[in-house]
Amino acid sequence: MADLLSSGLGEEQENEKEDRERDGKAAKTEKNKEKDRVTDTLRSNDKNGGNNGKKRNLSDLSLVRFITTELTRGYFLEHNEAKYTERRERVYTCLRIPKELEKLMTFGFFLCLDAFLYVFTLLPLRVILALLRLLTLPCCGLGGARLLQPAQVCDVLKGFIMVLCYSMMSYVDYSMMYHLIRGQSVIKLYIIYNMLEVADRLFSSFGQDILDALYWTATEPKEKKRAHIGVIPHFLMAVLYVFLHAILIMVQATTLNVAFNSHNKSLLTIMMSNNFVEIKGSVFKKFEKNNLFQMSNSDIKERFTNYILLLIVCLRNMEQFSWNPDHFWVLFPDVVMVIASEVAVDVVKHAFITKFNDISADVYGEYRASLAFDLLSSRQKNAYADYSDSVSRRMGFIPLPLALLLIRVVTSSVKIQGSLSFMCVLLFYLGMITLKVLNSILLLGTSCGFVKEANMEEKLFNPPPPVVSSRANSRAHRSKHVHIPPQQEPTIDKGGASVAADVSPPPSVAESSAPTLPKSDSDTFLTTPDGDDDEKIINANTGLEGLEPRTPKKDLLEIDRFTICGNRID
């Protein structure tokens, strides 16, 4: 009985378990069906919503709504404030350039005028005083003193050069040169004028070296070992240079005169357009402060030279028309047009150069201070050059050939006859001396103000630094960069192995305190366009090539007209 009861209870429990399992499966099936129905409902709703959204978006894409958006959309410049502030400062800099540039040009013009008037006024008087000393000092006894001071020797040499070159220039026929040039075609004259401009720069660069070599050869202390060819060969080279440069400027003046007297003014127009071609050749180049300083000095010299050439053209034309004042007013519009084109080209050129190279307009104040420093330095007790020579080196303006040509033109155009004419010449000479003295006084006062503003007063009282020749400097530069450790003789131990005595392993590149990062050639060119190959050194330990820290750039006081700044001369 017990077994039957236990088996019956087991069957009942199994039946109950099966019933519960069937009920759970049925409940799960119901839940899954409900989930499927909800999912289908949501999908259908999403489809209906998507269709409605698409219909709504299609309704928004209308022409009226697009035009309304274009008319009412806005933007905020303040989100990029730095960019627009920089653009505004560039505009203000371009607007300041004409004023600052003309200040520099005006100051430089009067500096050139001072050096130019010196040749006509004070130089003859200084030559006369030196000759009087040369004649009277032997009678009074030398007393261990020099026969002539170095400055007096230079003045006498300049006087002799002017006299010899003027006697040579008297054989040059200006009228024949004029008709020879006038017979050429317009294109030939245009090419000739461009060639003359290039030749003028080359003559100026080499001519000042010739004159400086002559002055140093004539005044070099005698106790030094002779390392020159003699004073007379240097003097003959200087005479030949001044004569050829004067002939070159005469051809320039004659070509300009032909352009003024041409009937259709085509040559004058072509010559003026040549100034605008200069904008294309200089604006789209990289300029640094030193390069811009050289270009500014070149523009000052070019403008002053053009004024003298225009004066020579007016004198020659007035002579041909018997000094009729009405003919001057015929020439006056062309003269104004040439000057105006020169000023406009300079302003546009400097404005865009400063814009593209991100140079401030305040740099022209530094240029004025550098030129003023030259003027004040020539008045110091420890001065090592005359002011006219300083202007020649700084601006490339050599007054001797231009003054020689002007004297030649004036003496051939103006006939001096009678005592009244001599009195007029004397009064004119006194007037030029007065103008020279007044100009020098004003320049000195203005220069003192510029030097004080630039805080350059201390440099005036320091002696000039000794200058090492470029060849010796380059040798020292190369020897400084070559680092080769002394090789030690190997020692042989008992085992026959060759070992070096006290040789420490070379330090690795990773252990160096300042590792050099390799740069590609293009990266080096873009970041350091003015670097030289001499700055590259080879490390003897690692065998790697690196770059030394770049030397500081030259001061403006060390930049002459024909000093290479970066990789070019401007």
Image (tube, rainbow, N blue to C red):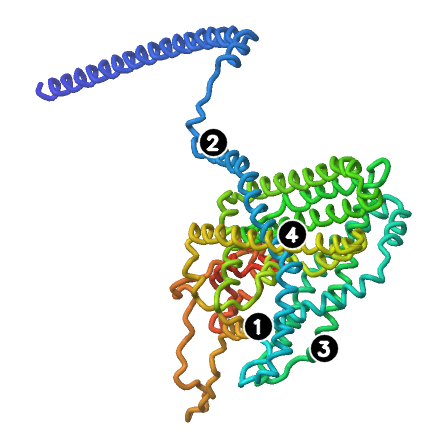
Q: Which residue is mark 4?
A: 301
Give the mark toward the camera: 3 or 4.
3
Q: Which residue is mark 1?
A: 469
- Amino acid, disc 3: Ile
Q: Are marks 1 and 3 in contact (CB under 8 Å)?
A: no
- Amino acid, disc 1: Ser
- Amino acid, disc 4: Lys
Between 177 and 194, the residue placed more toward the observer is: 177
Q: Is residue 289 above or below residue 6?
A: below
Give the mark toward the camera: 1 or 4.
4
Label 3 sits on a secondary structure element that is helix
Q: Identify the mark at residue 84; answer none if there is no mark.
A: 2
- Amino acid, disc 2: Tyr
Q: Are marks 3 and 2 in contact (CB under 8 Å)?
A: no
Could you tell which of marks 3 and 4 lies nearer the N-terminus? Answer: 3
Q: CA distance from mark 1 to mark 3?
A: 24 Å
The x, y position of residue 126, in whole percent, is 61, 67
Between 562 and 235, the residue placed more toward the observer is: 235
Q: Is residue 469 above or below residue 528?
A: below
Q: Identify the mark at residue 232; answer none if there is no mark.
A: 3
Could you tell which of marks 1 and 4 lies nearer the N-terminus? Answer: 4
